[in-house]
Amino acid sequence: MKPLVLFCKSYSTDLLRVKRLAQSVCTYNSQNLPFYVSVPEAELSLFHGHLVGHNVHLISDEDILRASPQIDVQQVARMPGSVAQQVVKSVFWRLGVSEAYVCLDSDAAFIRPFGIADFMTPEGIPYTVMDEAHGLLEEAVRHKRERVVGAFNREADLVQNIFGRVGRRYSFGPFPLVWHRAVWQSLEDRYLKPRSMSLADAIAQAPIESRWYGEALLAYQAVPLMPCQALFKVYHYAWQLDQERSAGINTEQLAKFYCGVIYQSAWERHLDWPREGGDWLSRVGRRLRRQLGKI
């Protein structure tokens, strides 16, 4: 079993984004960490055709779910895609390929050489992305997006209350995150099984997989807590990227602090596969809002 691998759950709409991510892995993966990408079985051939030569281990979502004895595959199939993918990401450890994995989203890209030391201590303890999200929340208030603050508080309270933890609200993100199999196992053994629940049931109850992991880590301490700041620079809005570029901030400067960057797919719709969604009017409107700094 490997100490660490990279993992990305994706689907056809994000094909070009995954290809960009795979290219960055090929360029910067200094220790040749195995890179796994899972997609629906029906889309395996599509991804095989576009990822030739990228040293990617392609697997199906269904194979991951079938390796999880507590999971009802049909239950997951009935979930909205945004929720079902959380289940797949959270039970990847069941394949038994590694002790821990870096869970990446399709809209990520590495910007400098990386290795195990970026994600784990020499003793094999994963770094846990964890803070109180003050940067994001302050920015939301500054731009009069109070709903962002409200959503953060509601999400945090929901899972904290499930575990009965009283105290500060933490963010266990943004992605990518380093997840250890022992933490997911402790959640299953100490919370889910005594309640005759599966992880799919838990995520259906509170669809925030990063909080299930983070609160389980705090509650059961399956591995020592080694907190860290975000591993990647995240651009939540296109105007944030535009502002930094105008200020002369480039990837070489970002690489001093981050392994990579996240470009939100909501404002990179030109990378949708096989084409940008919506009719011509909605596409023009989207691009105009992008130019005006509205997204």
Image: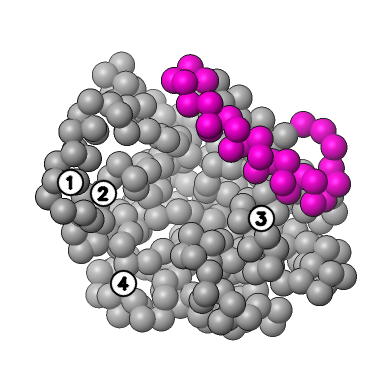
**4 and 3 marks in contact (CB < 8 Å):** no
Name above or below for residue 57 compared with residue 63. above
The residue labelled by disc 2 is 269
Name above or below for residue 164 compared with residue 48. above
N-term mark: 1 or 3: 3
Q: Picture coordinates of residue 208 (x, y %)?
A: 61, 52
* Front position in the image: 30 or 294: 294
Amino acid bearing label 3: Ala
**1 and 3 marks in contact (CB < 8 Å):** no
Q: Nearer the viewer, mark 4 or mark 3?
A: 3
The residue labelled by disc 3 is 206
Residue drawn 23% across and 32% down? 289
The residue labelled by disc 1 is 283
N-term mark: 4 or 3: 4
N-term mark: 3 or 2: 3
Q: Nearer the viewer, mark 1 or mark 2?
A: 1
Left or right position of 238 against 203 = left
Amino acid bearing label 2: Arg
CA neighbours of label 3 inside 10 A, class few (<14), some (14 to 19), many (20+):
some
